[in-house]
Amino acid sequence: MTSDTAEVRQILDMNAYRPGDSAAAAVDRRLANLGAASVLFYRRPIEMAEAKGAWMTATDGTRYLDFYNNVPSVGHCHPEVVAAVSRQIARLNVHTRYVVEVVDDYLEALKAALPAPLGNVVMTCSGSEANDLAIRIARAATGGTGVIVTETAYHGNTALVTEVSPSALKRGSLPDWVIAVPPPSAAHHGNDIAAGFRASIEAALAEFAARGIRPAALLVDSIFSSDGIFADPAGFLAPAVEAVRAAGGLFIADEVQPGFARTGDAFWGFARHGVTPDMVTMGKPMGNGFPMAAVAARPDDLAAFCADTGYFNTFGGNPVAAAAGAAVLRVIAEEGLQANAQRIGGLLRARLRETAARDGRVSDIRGAGLFIGIDLADGSGRPDPALTVRVIDAMRDRGVLIGAAGRYGNTLKVRPPLCLGEDEAALFAEAFEAALA
C-alpha cells in the first residue's frame, strides 16, 4: 500500500470526540472537569453503566460488543477477580514496606510465567511508570542514554516516556537521544522483515555513534500495536535484539498490550520471537481493570539502578493489586484463555480474509491470537482513514466497539476480551461486513 498524500495521525486524535461535536450534558460535565486533557471515544461519546464478559451496556440500555479495550482481558467484571479484590480490600491494603503473603505469592506466580533470568519484579501502578523505570534501569546498567523505538510507538505519558512515544507528540521532534525506526512491515522492509528491521536498528545505532550517544535500549511493544499491529513472521525480532546487544544496549519488551496470553501462540508477545528480554514491562490487562503494572528485570541490572537511586511506589504492589493479578493468572489458566485466543483469533482472521478477498478496500489482515489489525484503503491502495472512521461509526451503530491505530489511522485495532466466543466473533465479522456496504 502506498501512503502518498496520507496524513500522519496523532494517537489520541483517532476516533475521538472533538470540541464542537454534538454532545450530551454528561459530556459537557466531563469537559468542564478535565478540560483539554479529556479524551473521549467517538464524536458522540457513550455514557456507560455496566459491563460483563465481552459486553458493555450504556445508560440508555444499548448493549455493545467490546472489541476496543484490552484492559478487561479476561472479561469485564470477571466474578473471580471481583471476589478476590473484594476479599482483600476488606482485610488489608497497605504499601509494600510490610511483608504481606499475598504480594509475594503473586510475584512468584508471575515470575513463573517469565524467563528465569528476570528474577526481580518491581510493581508500579501504570504501564507509563513501568516503562519510565525500565529506561532508567537500562541507563544505569549500560551507561548509555540512547533509546530506539518505532516511528508510531506509544509507551506512556510520564515526561520521560512521552519523549520515546512519537505518536503522542503533537508538535516538535524527538530529542537527540531517541531515534524512531520504521515498523517491521513489508511496506518498509520487503519480504525479509527480519533482515530489514535489523538493518533499521543498525542504522539507528550508527546514527547514535555519529551523535556521540551510547545506546541504552531498544524499547518495543512486541506486537507493534500503535504502529498498526505487526506480528509476523514469528522470530523476526531476534536479529534486531542481537544488534542492540552487540552495541551494548538492552532489549525492553513492552508487554502492556500483547502480554498475558493475548497473542495465543505464547503468553508473551516476545516469546513468539524466541528472545529473552533484558526487561519486560507490563500493565493494563495485568489486573483486569485494577490499576497495576510492573517491570521484570535481571537482578544485577536493577541493583545497578538502585545503587544510585532509591525507588519506592506507594500503591505499586499493594495487596489488593496482588489479589487482582493473581486472580487474572488463575482465570487465564483455568479457563484456557490463551488457547481460546489462538482458536477464536484464527477463526476470525480467516473470516476477515474472506471479506478482504471480496472487497479490495480491506487491504491487509495481520495479527496473532486476539490481536488483529485490519488495514483499510481507497481504490488506489492508499491508506483511507476517512473510510476507517466511517466503518468505526457504522459498527458502533450496529452495537460493536472498535478503534483505530497506525501511522495514518487507517488500521482497525481488534482487541476483544480473551473470553470471546465463536458467536461473538461472528457478530463482529457481520458488523464489519455491513459497515463496509
Image (cartoon, grey):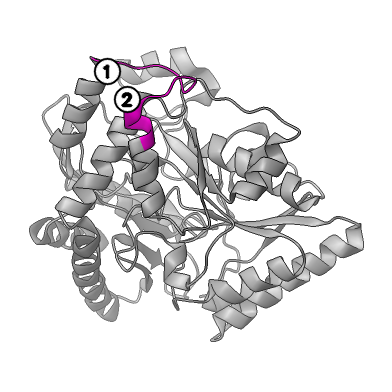
Quadrant housing residue 103: top left
**Above or below 382: residue 163:** above
Q: What residue is shown with label 2? A: 320
Residue furthest to the left in view is 423
**Above or below 334: residue 101:** above
**Which of the pair 230/321 is nearer the observer?**
321
- In the rendered image, the quadrant that contains the C terminus is bottom left
Residue count near mark 2 (Cα–Cα under 10 Å), binned few <14, some 14–19, many ≥20: many
Q: Which mark is residue 89?
A: 1
Residue 383 lies within the magenta run: no
Q: CA distance from mark 1 to mark 2?
A: 6 Å
Quadrant housing residue 66: top left
268 left or right of 343 in image:
right
Q: Which amino acid, mark 1?
A: Ile
Residue 100 lies within the magenta run: yes
- Which is more N-terminal, label 2 or label 1? 1
User: Residue 280 location in percent, x, y?
Assistant: 52, 51
For the question of whether residue 378 can be seen, the reply is no
Q: Which mark is residue 199?
A: none
120 left or right of 148 in image:
left
Q: Which amino acid, mark 2?
A: Val
User: In what element is the residue under mark 1?
Assistant: helix
Q: Which residues are magenta?
A: 91-104
| Tag 1–tag 2 contact (CB < 8 Å) | yes
User: In what element is the residue under mark 2?
Assistant: helix
**Above or below 173: residue 382:** below
